[in-house]
Image: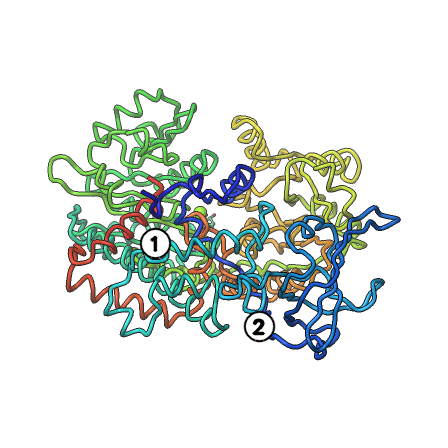
Amino acid sequence: MISLSTPIEKIPRIGPVSLKKLKRLGIRTINDMLFHFPYRYEDFSNLIPISELKINEICTVFGKVTEIKNTKTWKKRMMLTHIILEDKTGAVKAVWFNHPYIIKMVEKGDSIFLSGKLTIGKQGIYFSNPSYEKANEISNLKHTARLVPVYPETAGLSSRWFRYILKPLINEFGDKIVETLPEKIIKENNLLSVKEALWQIHFPDSFESVKKAKERFSFEELFFIELYVLKERSKIAKEKAVSFPFNLKLIKSFITSLSFKLTDAQKKSAFQILKDLEKERPMNRLLEGDVGSGKTVVAVLAALIVSKAKYQTAFMAPTEILAKQHFHNVSRFLKDFNLNIGLLTGKQDQFFSKKLKNQVIEISRRKILEKAKEGEIDILIGTHALIQEKVKFGKLALVILDEQHRFGVKQRAKLVLKDNQKIPHLLSMTATPIPRTLALTIYGDLDLSIIDELPKGRKKVITEIVSPNERFKTYKFITKEVKKGRQVFVICPRIEAKNNEKSLNWAEVKAVKEEYEKLSKDIFKDLKVSMLHGKMALKEKEKVMIDFKNKKTDILVSTSVVEVGVDIPNATVMMIEGAERFGLAQLHQFRGRVGRAGYQSYCFLFTESPAIKTQQRLRALISCENGFALAERDLEIRGPGNFSGTRQWGIPDLMMNSLKDISLVEKTRELAKQILIEDPQLKKYPVLKIRVNKLEKKVHLE
Ligand code: ADP
Ligand code: MG
């Protein structure tokens, strides 16, 4: 039997070519097809007599075809299809360019609708490429005389084709779509039913009903997300963890051992974390803080408390380079505390121990694993392979995640301490500033600590948009900075140049390899220039980074791989090519790579794009130094669909749009809470339960 989950191959009207294109769009089942939504609508609802047509107005006419023919243009050999349409009030011409098959669909004498804009051109006054539809479909119009849906046509499938397939499909399957929202919620919130919403989003009665349909789908998506995060939260709340008493003496001795004073925001976050560690239920906290705000030291304090109580910490970084950097920083921060700290990476495993007179030594992987199992390593640092590779920890009580956001209850359950069935506390850190609405939703299962100030004494990074004719002035400036002993990043959007893009003028995109050649051999031939990109071998990348860090090179030409976390305090210039290619949040991350020591630092944004939106976005970067405020701006200007990091959560664009609406976020959250209080296992709502479970799989990518 044919159902919603039936593969689209089974729909007879879809041929093999279209089938391939649909698959490229990720559409596999009838359900996928029904939920492929239009992104805008053409308003063809204004049906008028031919005599009332006006130039440049969009409208629809209805009449009889009195003439139809194909001709070829003399010069370009383009096929033109002409028809004359007549009603009681007059006649009008319509012309299609390169749609010769129309002549097979429409015959002389047919009654048809034409929708489009009347124009004046070489062919006189005529409809140019109008939408058309035969009158025998009058009860079932889809292309004319109404609001007509326009679909994203990325794979070369036309909107006309989608309408042709979709209308009968909704007719047939609309009834089979199961309502996912509880009846009561639909009524009380004045929402459309799923079936009605589906009709209205594809073939709406009015713009008002489009809005209502979108509202219904946004509501639904938000509601599921809220249910999911609240369920996750309650699951964690039921688990047990080791509690660590507030050790004021130890905390004080750590703080006084630092070479700097903690900022108030650092202190506040540290306090929240230490309070969590005191509890017997597992901490589940996200530490958000702008680049350079000093998250690491806060996390290290938590690890110290855990270590001194003879429990272990796993500290996971997104890349091996960063794991290594953390290893060295953590070892330095804790050098007076008599701890064993390990680094587990692909090849070079290292070990730091007070007993070894504060030295770092290399030991075998086997030995590190052994020591971890015996509880002899207090803090083990590595990539997420630490957990995935099933490193056995004897007494793991804290997991710190740098830039990985989330770690499901199930993943954590795998790390339970066998003797007491307790699960580790979790501290997740991110430099991606997430606006509150978003945080409340996608990170609603986590408690939030925010470090919203930078350490004192940091100079504001001077940010400038550089026009193409000032390029050489900037190169001169860079040379001067290097002569002063400073270092420079040059960021390019891609690794290699693409030939076909070269001709496109402003769209020409700078590539690392080319720029490296140009800068090292020509512009800065007296300086030491190096190159970094994602396609290089790990060893090579590390060498480049280490050489840069040790000031063996002056200028590093790189792709966005340097975006996350690398600490080069001596760097003062961040020069970004093709700045329009990056999101504001990402540009802000790049900028955070400089200005980390006391030197005045600079961020130069190169763009050859004249688009107003680009200029607007880049100017926001100049006027705003605060990552959170910038994230809000990015959300406003680019729309939430592009918001960094959200794509990977599988959050649909439609819902992303509704995230702007904080009152809707709050409302759905409240409703989700009520439902869970009444029925925590969602026993009375089997459909809801299925949807929430699906979401769980998506979010944790398990
Ligand atoms: P991020 O939050 O981006 O991870 P880091 O933890 O790497 O930032 O800290 C950036 C730099 O600032 C490090 O060199 C760190 O030692 C230093 N730092 C951290 N806190 C302070 C502070 N309160 N005062 C001065 N420097 C600090
Ligand atoms: Mg960091």
Q: Residue 55: give its label.
A: none
Tally the numbered discs: 2
Residue 517 at what x, y percent from top left?
74, 33
> Relative to the observer, which residue lies in front, 366 or 216?
216
Question: Can you tell which of label 1 and label 2 is closer to the viewer?
Answer: 2
Which quarter of the figure has residue 265? bottom left
Q: Residue furthest front?
A: 109
Quadrant containing the C terminus is top left
Q: From the viewer's perspective, is residue 426 above or below residue 619?
A: above
Q: Which mark sits nearer the N-terminus, 1 or 2?
A: 2
Residue at the image point whose x is 53% and y is 40% from the top: 15
Query: Where does label 2 land, which residue?
Result: 45
* Residue type at tag 2: Ser
Viewer-nearest residue: 556 or 189: 189
**Figure quadrant of residue 67:** bottom right
Q: Amino acid at mark 1?
A: Leu
User: Residue 590, relative to residue 670: is it above or below?
Assistant: above
What numbered label is drawn on residue 286? Answer: 1
Circle 2 Cα neighbour tier, 10 Å, few/some/many (<14 / 14–19 / ≥20): some
Say whether residue 635 is visible: yes
Residue at figure coordinates x 35%, y 39% from the top left: 335
Q: Which quadrant holds the N terminus?
A: top left
Q: Secondary structure at mark 2?
A: loop
Residue 13 placement (x, y as % from top left): 49, 45
Residue 535, given in percent of the width and then of the height, sits at 57, 31
